[in-house]
Image (spheres, helix red, strand yellow):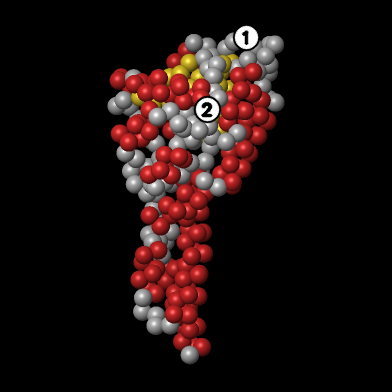
Amino acid sequence: MDRSIFLSLALASLLVGVVSARDWNILNQLKALGSSSSSSQNAIVSSGLSTNLKRYCESWRFNVEVHNIRNFDVVPQECVSHVQNYMTSSQYEDDVERTVDEVILHFGSMCCSKSKCDGMDAWIFDIDDTLLSTIPYHKSNGFFGGEKLNSTKFEDWIRKRKAPSVPHMVKLYHEIRERGIKIFLISSRKEYLRSATVDNLIQAGYYGWSNLILRGLEDEQKEVKQYKSEKRTWLTSLDYRVWGVMADQWSSFAGCPLPKRTFKLPNSIYYVA
């Protein structure tokens, strides 16, 4: 009997090991367990698979953040709960706080202070999941990346003006503003959402920006990375010095001109190209 259990565990371990990360799926692993007749064996192996799944999903999330995984339409179904757990956890808030700390350290290398700025120093923020959190939307709809975003439903939610601020971001926003640096908000939200966006930003504690740039009709057919690159080009053509860009999507940083620094906030719920 002991030998039988050992062989079953070894076989299950081998099945887990030989499947590449890209093709790994918990359903396939559970099917492999279906032939086992002992409930105790299944309990032991299932525990191992649970640990393996958690590691796989954390690895998937990590590779999204470092931009190794790109252009995904949905989060792998077996990882949706993992992504949800992370994005609603204190660890997410700690990770945002550490990013904010790095931005503040970056200010130490800047020559600009409120008394010395000439009005041409600029900072760019994205809005969704950078200043305003979409977590309540995903909680209400239960998706967390498991389904493609329904633009109509999401825009209806935006119009309710109830998005809270991303943790720690209101304080950072005003610290930058009080240094005399002009803040530009460049978002992929549509122009017809301007009123709802302005109201929500103010309610969440943000005010005093120099310009809020949203996508007009002429921008809607462009990829986000092209649209945001063009807006940075426009700013630099006006002789602004862009000291940094802060966003949750890599598309906010792509293209030229490059800012002096970029700071990415964690978000593995969706990918915007």
Q: How many marks?
A: 2
Which disc is residue 118 wearing?
1
Q: In this picture, is 87 found above or below 156?
A: below
SS for tag 2?
helix
Residue 205 rendering spot, x and y as whole percentages: 55, 25
Crowd class of label 1 (few under 14; some 14 to 19; many from 20; radius 10 Å)? few
Provide residue 199's location: percent of width, then percent of height.
Answer: 45, 22
For this orientation, the residue located farthest to the bottom is 1
Please tell me which residue is depicted at 40% across the width and 43% down the height of the picture: 140
149 relative position to 69: left or right: left
229 vs 115: above or below? below
> Which SS class for mark 1?
loop
In this view, 66 is above or below 15: above
The percent position of residue 228, horizontal first and vertical second, equals 42, 25
What residue is pinned by disc 2?
204
Circle on res. 94: none
Dot 2 or dot 1: first in sequence order is 1
Q: Nearer the viewer, residue 258 or 269?
A: 269
Going by the numbered disc 1, the residue's amino acid type is: Asp
Residue 224, image quadrant = top left
Q: Give the amino acid at mark 2.
A: Ala
Q: Is residue 110 visible?
A: yes
Around disc 2, counting alpha carbons within 10 Å, would you say few (fewer than 14), some (14 to 19), or many (20 or more)? some
Residue 74 showing in the rendered view: no
Q: Cα distance, mark 2 to mark 1?
A: 29 Å
Measured along the vertical axis of the image, is residue 1 above or below residue 84? below
Q: Which of 205 and 44 lies nearest the eye of the viewer?
A: 205
State if disc 1 and disc 2 touch (CB < 8 Å): no
Please identify, in this view, whether the residue under mark 2 or under mark 1 is nearer the observer: 2
Query: Which quarter of the rendered picture does the C terminus lie within?
Result: top left
Q: Report the residue at 42% width, 71% height from top.
A: 15
